[in-house]
Amino acid sequence: MRRSCIVAAVIAIAGTGTPDATAATPDVPTEKGAPWPSMRHDRFNTGRSPIRARYHQGDRPWAFVTGKGVFSTPIVDRNETVYAGSADTWFYAIRGGRRRWRFKTGEIIDSAGVLGRGGTVTFGSGDEHVYRLRSGRVLWRYRATRKPAQGQLVNWWEGNVTMGPGGVLYAGNTGGAEYALNPNGRLRWIHPTGNSVWSNAGIGKDGSVYFGSLDLNIYGLNARGGLKWKRGTLGFVTSSPAIGPGGTVYIGSFDGELHALDPETGDDRWAYTTDDHVYASPALGESGVYIASADGSVYAFDLRGTLRWRYDTGDTVRSSPVLGRAPSGKGRILYVGSANGRLYALDARTGRRRWSFDTTPRDPTLRDRNDLNSSPALGRRGVYIGGEHGRIVFVPYEWCLRTPRDPRCNRSPGEAFGGSLSRMAFVTPGGSTRLSGPGAELPAATAITTRLLIRQVGETVDAGLAAPTRVTADPPFEFTAQPSGDGHFVHIVPTGFLPPGRTFRLQVEGGWSGDDRSGAVADTIRFRTAGVRRRGPPLATGRARVSAFRLSRLAVPLPPILPSLNQIGFDSYEMAVGALTVSPPDPRGEGSLLLWAVSTKRAGKATVADRRGAFAFPLQGRYRHDSLLLSQRGLSLTFSFGDVPLRRFDLRMQMGADRRARGASLTAEVFCPEVPVYGPALVAIGLCNRDAILPSSGTFITGPYGGPANRRPRGVRLAGLELRRPSAGASGLAVARLRGSRFPADRHAAAILLTDPDSGAVVSLDYRKATSLRLSHGSIREVRLRIPAGTDLPDRIKAYVITDVFPLAEREL
């Protein structure tokens, strides 16, 4: 364990108790009687409730299902109505597990709101608006007025809204500023930063405003928005500051530290370094402070910075801990979520588990989508938390103590992995650590990730693998093994299909070092491949329509920093993927595939192509019966700070007749110097390996797609296709002209794809960025593909003209 707990100043109030923070005070008009009116409960961001954890007879756990992941913290009003936003773009009001109302915004919602007097709720959305509602009706909306900071593309509201004296509202946005709004929705002031502000501002007794930014700084402002101080860290700051009774500002950073800062100068009073970045916000008790880290642990300190205890949940923690009273009123219970899908209740004095509740859904499609990166909210009757699975979950206080036979409950007081351990553990595509292995059969097209896990005398060691690491397979198969930059993971990717219905053993061994310790590890991961469920190619082409499937809700949990920066972005992706060509199977049941993926949107009851979406790219690969191995080398993923080019993007799965993927695994590689804005930081913090590659792994969801994007557009035909080849100094151009019936651009997309007819290889281009359309009266009439200067084209070109995901025509040029 890395420790640096240096007291920089003596805290005069360290020995005194802190009275319970009340959410509604005379000068802060949050809703009276609301048990959890804002993300961190009160203006000081204490994350602390005065309510005792008493079970109410008849209460049972429930889960409300939204359309996509929930990453925002719920808030709870005096009637126990719960409010939260979802990546499905809706903001929900729920009571007792049933929807009271919902409000549609124009983009994802991943920040918490605040409850005000008169039944109002105020929250921000990715559609660049802050909304104030009453009973689902808009009272006012405010749109960000300042242009995004350099390096940012959008003005999404991803900073949680909080309320200060006089009802003034404070919120940060992705555009790089902290805003203060008057209660009527008019701008009070703006304080610009150098990057996104996701932190929930803490408001001091004197009206000072404290928050963090992705520009690596922590800010202290006066009540008028003027700068008091700016304190740099060595990492992004998404954590929300908790303000102590003497004004001390407690806040985490991606540099792995919990900082205790002087409120007047921003200087460290003390700091403690955890074993990974800190995304979460601290909770403040009467005599201690609590923080969670992406290293999977929750830490407890006294107010002088002395570590009291550490509890390892076993998987990444981005959820911010909260504190409630024990049923007797004496002592505190700490509640926090983990990426393993469990909500934990820990004794705040000892750190021992009181109980945990597994929120993982039974749905096989979502079982591996169980990260609890939302933070808990404490109501009068129990705990509320949102999850990557798209559910808002309610667990009654003390449920697991009253119903010990509930299989979702665990009352063991210990940590996830016991006393001493030296393992290379299997990690699911969704990011959960499994000591016992996969637990289910893997597809013949799969990828495997292992995690180094060292425990000594009850402590988790921050250990990394030392090169070289040896990986062997029995029975043997060809693969690549890519270590992560920090040595915590090894990504093992077979180069082809594995035989179905076979048992394999992967031996991983090597040396490790960390926390001034070293040793060796050798472990075996056993897995079995699934048998063939459906023979023949899973996709087909036709003159009127082609097979297609939905590709959605990507998750990239490894390395852990990626979800911390873009989890809701990945989860919001929606695409249709259609078959351009499918070769007949050979005697082994194997053949080739060429597919086209395009972003989609809802248009009434239909799901149509979205030409303004983030995606339009080919997927090339092979199938063996119902197993698919797809790859793309020219894809870019769009983040709020720009497009990140991928050196590798692979999808592996077993696809059923219903187009649903089983055992879906995703692998990708980024060349760190090519990452805009953050590339140097990724190298500096050790996320890139010796080859400057950031390897990542994850999963995705597929499902049936019924059209209309996979159908031949009625009356539309190709009138001409021309190619001007690029030279060393001049770009080239491919132009396709469409004629016939209307092909409206607000419901359709079009593209040109270039391939080598001899090898079948796709010409590697960023097709989305290189494509432009010419319209006539709103209808697509011409498709233009710019080919960058210096692009090496094959002597012969086979071009596909694609309408949505349908291959309208193909020509050799």
Image: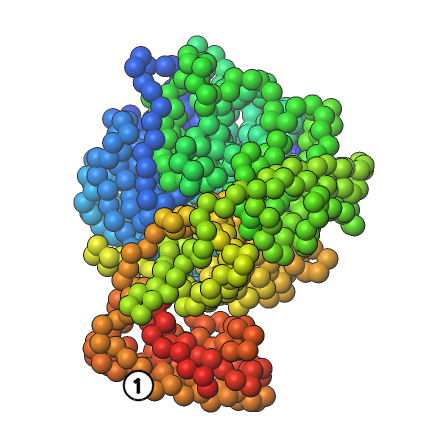
Q: Nearer the viewer, residue 471 or 655?
A: 655
Q: Nearer the viewer, residue 554 or 45?
A: 554
Pointer 1: residues within 10 angstroms few (<14), some, or many (20+)? few
Element class at badge 1:
strand
Name which residue lies at 76% across and 41% down.
Answer: 509
Residue at far top of view: 328
Residue 740 placed where, x, y %?
22, 81
Q: Is residue 727 above or below residue 463?
A: below
Position of the N terminus by quadrant: top right
Residue 544 placed where, x, y %?
28, 68
Q: Is residue 145 above or below residue 339?
A: below
Residue 78: image quadrant is top left
What colour-coding does the image apply? rainbow
Q: Nearer the viewer, residue 604 or 11?
A: 604
Decide if residue 404 is on the left or right side of residue 102: right
Residue 605: image quadrant is bottom left
Name which residue lies at 32% across and 37% down.
Answer: 65
Residue 268 placed where, x, y %?
63, 41
User: For mark 1, what is the residue?
Assistant: 719
Residue at far front of view: 587
Name which residue lies at 49% across and 61% down.
Answer: 585
Decide if residue 89 is on the left or right side of residue 725: left
- In the rendered image, is residue 47 in sight? no
Residue 398 placed where, x, y %?
42, 16
- Amino acid type at mark 1: Ala
Decide if residue 432 is on the left or right side of residue 7: left
